[in-house]
Amino acid sequence: MIIWITWTLGAGKWTISDYLIEKKWFKHYSVSGYITEEIKKRWMEVNRDTMYQVWRELKRENWADFIVKELYKKAKTEWWKAIIESIRSPWEVDWLKELDDFKLISVDADIKTRYERIKLRWSEKDNVDYETFVANNAREWDSDSIDPTKINLSKCVLQADFKIDNNWSFQDLYDQVDEIVS
């Protein structure tokens, strides 16, 4: 079983991933983690701008679905249940839909709630003011471009098999996840 997650910034993908790892024996794979490792190999600063830059470069060099294909191959060979998060492009979803075991979850919450969450996690890539957060969110939410190296979360969310509203308690989030997994 492989579950894929698309999300809005700070919506709770890590909380879902942690829950599935701890309670359901899933192994976690992350597009962001893959990109972060690539950034470090290039001796670049890890922040949202360099993540976006390297993500686009990898896609230009290898095609739009390169990273998700790499993570999928790894997940299929390493464990029997996996969660792969950070699906950001409709071109990734197009390839993933060809898989027999593809299920996509989107997770979202109110933008102010999401900003408060990212401030609490002290991540190097999310250490930004509210205006920058809103601008990053807008950049990643919608792109009218047909460029496969651009992020377009709105189109990914539209293609999700399941949608999670994470505006409430941890227990409410876990209940939604349990319902999907069962």
Image: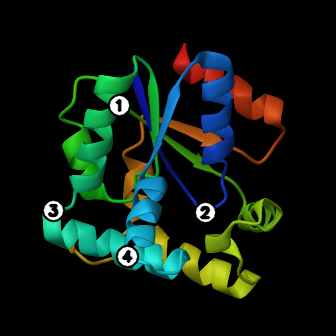
Counting residues from the start of the chain, the first of labels 4 and 3 encountered is: 4
* Residue 63 image label: 3
48 relative to 117, above or below:
below
Residue at x-position 37% and y-position 76%: 42
The front one of 87 and 51 is 51
Disc 4 element: loop
Q: Is residue 122 visible?
A: yes
Res 78 → quadrant: top left
Residue that numbered label 1 is attached to: 75
Of badges 2 and 3, nearer the viewer stands 3
Disc 4 residue crowd, few under 14, some 14–19, many 20+, Cα 10 Å: few
Q: Residue at x 39, y 69 (%)?
A: 41
Q: What residue type is disc 4 on?
A: Arg
Residue neighbourhood size for the residue with mark 3, other residues' Cα within 10 Å, grouped as few (<14), some (14–19), many (≥20): some
Tell me if 147 is positioned left or right of 113 in this view.
left
- The residues bearing labels 1 and 2 have C-alpha atoms spaced at a distance of 24 Å
Give 145 or 32, whichever is nearer the viewer.
Answer: 32
Q: Are marks 2 and 4 in contact (CB under 8 Å)?
A: no
For mark 4, what is the residue? Answer: 42
Dot 1 or dot 4: first in sequence order is 4
Separation of marks 2 and 4 at Cα, in angstroms: 25 Å
Q: Nearer the viewer, mark 1 or mark 4?
A: 4
Quadrant where the C terminus sits is top right
Label 2 or label 4, whichever lies nearer to me, is 4
The residue wearing badge 2 is 9
Q: Secondary structure at mark 3?
A: loop
Say whether marks 3 and 1 touch (CB < 8 Å). no
Q: Quadrant location of residue 25?
A: top right
Gap between marks 1 and 4 measured at Cα: 25 Å
Mark 3 or 1, nearer chain start: 3
